Amino acid sequence: MTKWRASAAVRLAIGYSAALAIGMAALGAIVFLAMHVAFTRQLDATVADEVRTLATEFHSDGGGELSDAIAQRESSTSPARLLYAVFAPDGRRIHGTLQTVRPALGFHDIRFIDPREGPDSARGLAVDLSRNERLLVAADREWIERIDRTILTVFVAGFLVLCLLGFGGAILFGTYLRERLQSISNGAEAIIAGDIRGRMAVGPRGDEFDQLATTLNRMLERIERLLDNLRQVSTDVAHDLRTPLAALRNRLEQGALELHEKGAADRAIADAISRVDDVLALFSAILRIAEVESAHSRRFFEEVDISALALELAQGFEPAVRDRGREFLWSIEPSLRLNGDRELIAQAAANLIENAQRHTPEGTLIRLTLVAIGDGVCLQVIDNGPGVAKADRSRIVERFQRLDRSRNTPGHGLGLSLVDAVARIHGGSLTFKDNAPGLIAILRLPNHPPSS
Amino acid sequence: MKILILEDDAALREHVTGLLAAAGHVVDGCASGPEAIFLATSNDYAVLILDRMVPDLDGLAVLKALRAAGVRTPALFLTAADSIRDRVEGLEAGADDYLVKPFAGSELLARVAALARRPPIESQVTVLRVGDLEIDLLKRTVTRGKERIDLQPQEYKLLEYLMRHRGEIVTRTMLLESIWSFHFDPGTNLIESHISRLRAKIDRGFDRELIQTVRGAGYRIVDND
């Protein structure tokens, strides 16, 4: 029973049917009272009519006729027949057969002795016909009582049926909800128990529960992807860390063997430091992305003259890019301003340029463009190098994603992840398009980033 | 020069002390904030090196206290992570420079030297000279000997920075920070390419090379005569 009390559905359904039952009871009581009063009035009217008729007869025909009239009426077998009595002032009954005491004038509920059924109640009207004769005409209440009983029976039966239906319905409703929710709960339990690939059962009806299950499944897919990503990142960090550390170890070992050679120690140490710097750079990049992704980075948003920044970047990179055998051109729309983090935008743009020259052969033309779009700016780094296959384009922003599976190219595969993170905290996006041949990296930054 | 270092990591403190001592500096080391405040207020140091994170009273609080007490000694923060927040807080508290751990010894030495020799106010200076190379800061013109040299804006900024620090080593990161305001490693060695272009303009064809590369550290502009 406690189990049922704990069910919200059962509580709701029982509460709802209780309210209905109370409503039904109130309605029954009102109908009962209204009909009771109406019937009593009707009875009074019948009695009053009869009294008026008899009084008229008495005044036109005299006392003798009254006795006959009463006797004639009393001999009727109609179920609606009335009861009559005429009393002398001393209380004696002088006409009629109604066995009761002499009443006061006016309408009364009276008690009388029914020769067949014993004491009974009736509705009576007493008037004085003359000084010595008081006429009482009464109507048996029996048929009102019968109607009352019928009405009561109908309503009580209805009330009971309603209660039964309500309670039964509540249990059925509760059981149904419980079963539907149980299937979702079971799915969740299975996932808690470790089966992250488990999913909620989705019924064929597409109702609220199925929609909920579908939503939960979408959430689970997202979580699973994130977990996979996390697992992949952990593995990649371990791998990216082990490779340079192993190389460092080998280098030091080799250095130890060559110690007797002149200058070998210096070379070994310089080499070792540069290898350690690579490892440190990897960690800096990881921490940097984590920092960008954490919410407090928005604290440093300010108005950035992005045109000036882009020009500075272009001029800063140009000699270096040319020295490495690539062409570098830019076209920058002047006086564009943006609410953002100057340092992060600079780093994102630098990473895009760096990425373009790292993954293209010598002789490639790299272009930087900045234009206003809608409510923000669009910064593009365009190259005419080998490009990236369409299927790979969405993957290249993933952490540690290097299209070169052997992971032997330089770089740690975090550059574009950082650009993506920067785009996202500005409420913008990083996308890639085919330049046929080559790749277009598109960094969109809206001017009014969402404040959340 | 006399230098104070506040660093609770004994190994790192000894490492830095050794580096600075090898460069000819006198170093006082301490591991707690109150000690650092006491030493800094009772001695005359050329530079303070403060670890951002030490237990109890951290470098930030120490520097705020010292600045409030009127100690104007140039201060360099050491921060554990390359966090923008740390950097901004440090500079707001009155630090003159900051360095992210782990750092190269040459970087620390270059920055300490730059802080210690920081000229009081150079706004009055309108002409910078190294040998026969001259920058007119008002007209923004560069001449070597009698020859006028045309520089790109960024080359000009680079040369101006080198000449304001003439005789000192300036590192790649110092140049990135001061000329481009980049507090990150852009991957590509921007500085190298700019320096080689600058050299081509101001040194090529002249008898003496003024811009020197200090291996493993950075660059220096100096007139060796």
Image (tube, grey):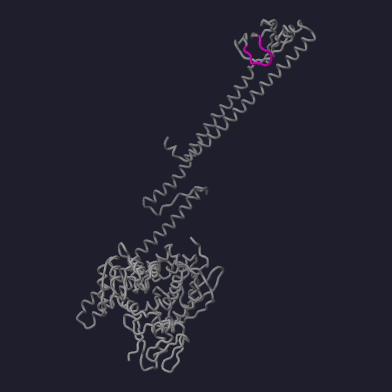
Look at the magenta stretch and give its main secondary structure: strand
Residue sitting nearer the eye, B105 or A221: B105
Residue sitting nearer the eye, A398 or A323: A323
Which image quarter: residue B62? bottom left
Which image quarter: residue B198? bottom left
Question: Residue A253 in the image: x percent, y percent?
Answer: 23, 74
Residue sitting at x 48%, y 39% = A174
Residue sitting nearer the eye, B208 or A36: B208
Magenta-span inclusion, residue A319: no
Image: B12 above or below A117? below
Judge left or right: residue A21 versus residue A258: right
Give the number of marks. 0
Question: Residue A330 in the image: x percent, y percent?
Answer: 50, 79
Residue extent of the magenta highlight: A102-111
Question: Residue A339 in the image: x percent, y percent?
Answer: 50, 68
Judge left or right: residue B164 versus residue B14: right
Magenta-span inclusion, residue A104: yes
Image: A95 above or below B156? above
Residue sitting nearer the eye, A394 or B89: B89
Q: Residue furthest right?
A: A60
Which image quarter: residue B90? bottom left
Q: Residue furthest left?
A: A260
Residue B128 appearing in the image:
yes
Question: Residue A442 in the image: x percent, y percent?
Answer: 50, 71
Quarter of the image for the N terminus of chain A: give it: top left
Image: A215 above or below A408? above
Residue sitting at x 45%, y 90% = B149
Residue A401 appearing in the image:
no
